[in-house]
Image (cartoon, rainbow, N blue to C red):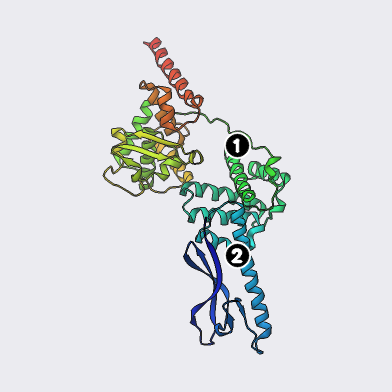
Amino acid sequence: MQKISYSVRFFEYKKKSGKAGIYLQLVIDRVARRIPLEEEFYPELFDKVKEQFRYDGINDEEITDLNLLLNKYKARANELLRRYRLADRKVTHDSFKMEFLNYASRDKFVEWSKQKLESLKMGDLIKTQTYKHKKSRLKHFEEFAGTDILFSELTPEKIAGFDNHLRKVKKLKHNSIQAIHVSINGFIREAVECKVNVENPYKKFKIKAYKRGKRDPLEIDELKRLKHLYKAQHLEEIQQEVLRKYLFSCETGLRISDNNALDYENIENKVLTINTVKGESFGVVVTVPLTKYAISLIDIKKRRGPVFRNISDQVVNRNLKVIASKAEIYRNLTFHSSRDTMATNFIDAGGNAETLKELLGHSDIKTTMIYVKISEARKKKLIMNLDSL
């Protein structure tokens, strides 16, 4: 059990006026940290036992106000610690400081969610890529409802309006909309766990299931053209990097989120091991032996640091369309097709569905079987070509 205490203290430095700044000292398991408060006053008038200012007959009105403020600060600290206990949350200096200084936002959904997200980031409790996705999805809601929307204003009707906004105004696709709803619902559920007084509107608004996207693997000659284009080194710098990322996933099957998060620490003895971003909540880990071509795309001798440049998904997919044109590939090339390409080529080469399921980090073999069907259809098409001989 954590041992926690707090008290009001003065900074050592005095201004020419004789006043000094005031801070709240928080002690967690004998480790003390300071949280600066906005007020300053004369230290000699402060009663350290009562943690109140003594009246001097000169500044009595100001002292009355200051004492009220100090009581409010201590009440705030006490309330925050009570919420931590009720939610069975561990108190850290960083999370407490953030919540203490942003206490006024506790009734505002967007502000509370931003604060919660930053707290997770500061505590290293969330992956960078997951943090970016959640922040982006929260921004969609903020644009619709405003920064100051209260928890009490979160109704099923408000969520339905948000859904309509995403479809008709933002013109987002079905799966993108559902992913945003999942994140917003997640923030609200976190608030409920933290004892925020809110009725979750998603109890009466159904988040729809994801629609299975079209699988679109590259043909073998298309993949060869892209490899030739990469080797020629004639592309712009960002296009060359985007193609390197893409070709690496054609060999490993990594999603774009995992490709972005990949660090050289994830690679050892020519084997890639990574906790997937999409399966983060379920502890999904994939292990992929690297092919010779995959190794040629990276600096295998490096021990740490990002494998690829941090490029947004939108910029990656925009550049892939330019790259496809230069390689004379006439299709809507997206990053996900690299994963489809690896999976289909694996089955074509004689791999089995169970092994592919593990390589891709699928939870359901039915998802993996899609690639088996694609491979079978491709083989059938090749066999039919014999009729033209």
Report helix, strand or loop for mark 2.
helix
Disc on the earlier residue, 1 or 2: 2
For image coordinates 44% across by 28% down, the residue present is 357
Q: Which residue is mark 2?
A: 77
Estimate the spatial distance between the alpha carbons at disc 1 and disc 2, rounded to whole Å: 43 Å
Residue 350 position (above or below residue 227): above
Q: Position of residue 230 (x, y in %)?
A: 32, 38
Q: Nearer the viewer, residue 261 or 177?
A: 261
Which amino acid is tagged 1?
His
**Vertical comparison of 192 with 23: above or below:** above
Q: Amino acid at mark 2?
A: Ala
Q: Residue at x 40, y 31 (%)?
A: 359
Q: Residue at x 28, y 33 (%)?
A: 292
Q: Which mark is residue 174?
A: 1
Position of residue 273 measured from the top left corner of the image (x, y, whole percent): 37, 38
Q: Nearer the viewer, residue 198 or 212?
A: 198
* Residue 90 vertical placement versus 200 (above, below): below
Q: Nearer the viewer, residue 127 or 60?
A: 60
Determine the secondary structure under disc 1.
helix
| Residue 76 left/right relative to 236 | right
Estimate the x, y position of residue 268 in percent, counting from the top left.
Answer: 30, 40
